[in-house]
Amino acid sequence: MARHFKRFIFQTAFFFALAAVFPQRTSILNGNNDFSIDFPLGFNLVDSNSEGTSFQLQSLVPSTVVTAVVRVYQDGRYDSSKSALEGTMKALGAEYEIEEFEWRNQTSAISSLAMVIGREQESGYALSAVLPEKQGIVVVVTWTPARFYDRAESYMLSLLDSLNIDAGSYYEAGPVTAYQFAKSSEYIPVNLEIDGTKISTRLRANDNEAASYLIEREYAVLSLYAGNSLWKDAWQRYYRMIFRDSYQRLWQASFDIFNEIFPKAKDNTDLAQKLLYWTQNFTYEREKNTSDFAPLPSILLGGGSDCDSRSMLLSVLLTAMNMEAPMLVSAQYGHAMAAITSDHPGHSFEFNGTGYLMGETTSKGLTWGKIDSTQDDQSKWILVEFP
């Protein structure tokens, strides 16, 4: 079944006319919807060139002014992401410190920056990456007045980390997280038991640390929207960022679980049911961190979990098994549930013309399509869709 996940095309005239606040992932190059940025909520387009290769944006969300510039250089203009970033920094008159790192099987570059605009000292970050199929090099730069840097730092890093340059980017840690936590060559064993079947899999040694970093940073961004009209969209983006970071970390586990459990399942819904029963037996524990969200690698390692981390775990694993598996969150109920598309009977909610069976992860023995009758008002639930 086709998914209703939206990708909004970055068309200059459209955004100038409406002065739009970006609601979701925004494609940069016409004709290439895989190249996009999942902007933190609040950015407005304020300038662009006629070629559609340079864009300037501003956001007032962190109670300051955060500026972002996206520049796409044609293939051949620079010979590397580092040289493109260096050229951009010089054009801005910024002080910078560039480091190279590996992301999406190619060398990217990242830098801190400091510069003066008018009489204001500005601080920020910049990132560059080579686009596939000789589409050029993208440079993303973001800065804020230095006196507001501490408040805006997570916001700026989140912007850079939301860059996607190809289809695979949507299912792998973003470039900032990849820079700070290079993929470890060491693995730790993970032993699971699902539906009476013992399963051996593995995680990279630094997966849990990296996932924890991403969650806490994104929660800091989400906190900026308290009392803001954009809170609902910001909440959805928070979970999208966690999904993206978690997918590749748990891909091996999903593969190993599928190979062991699917042959014993009647169909996809039965497979999902076995995983739902499994999560219902986890140790219930509120995470002792700012976000109160348990990193998914820690759950596989036997750590405690709450409703939203369990629901996200199911979304990641089932999506990797080629099922449509969004999650549902509710501020009014203070709860989260997993969801799947299925032709099996059961109580469902309908969003965008698609019916979803809900999965309650914190009450043992419940099947897909059975939820607490006191939490049955669909208007109080928010659908969080994933790629």
Image: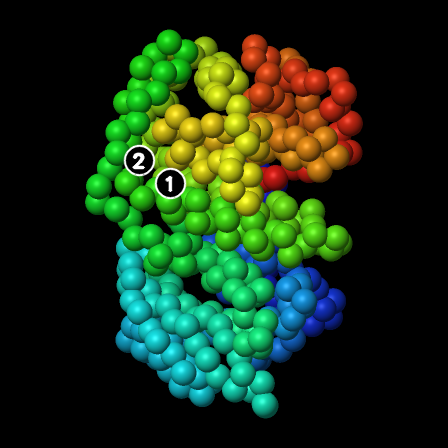
Figure quadrant of residue 291: top right
Q: x and y percent of residue 238 in the render?
A: 57, 47
Identify the residue at horizontal 21%, vertical 45% (top origin): 185
Give the mark nearest the N terminus, 1 or 2. 2
- Residue 129 visible within the image: yes
Quadrant location, the N terminus: top right
- Residue 269 visible within the image: no
Residue on which the image places disc 2: 203
Identify the residue at horizontal 32%, vertical 77% (top origin): 83
Residue on which the image places disc 1: 208
Relative height, residue 261 to residue 82 (above, below): above
Identify the residue at horizontal 48%, vertical 20% (top origin): 282
SS for callout 2 = strand
- Categorize mark 2 by other alpha carbons within 10 Å: few (<14), some (14-19), many (20+): many
Tell me, yes or no, whether the two marked residues, 1 and 2, touch with CB atoms within 8 Å: yes
Identify the residue at horizontal 65%, vertical 35% (top origin): 329
Relative height, residue 161 to residue 19 (above, below): above
Q: Compute the Cα span from label 1 to label 2.
A: 9 Å
Instruction: Single out the residue that lies furthest toward the left.
Output: 185
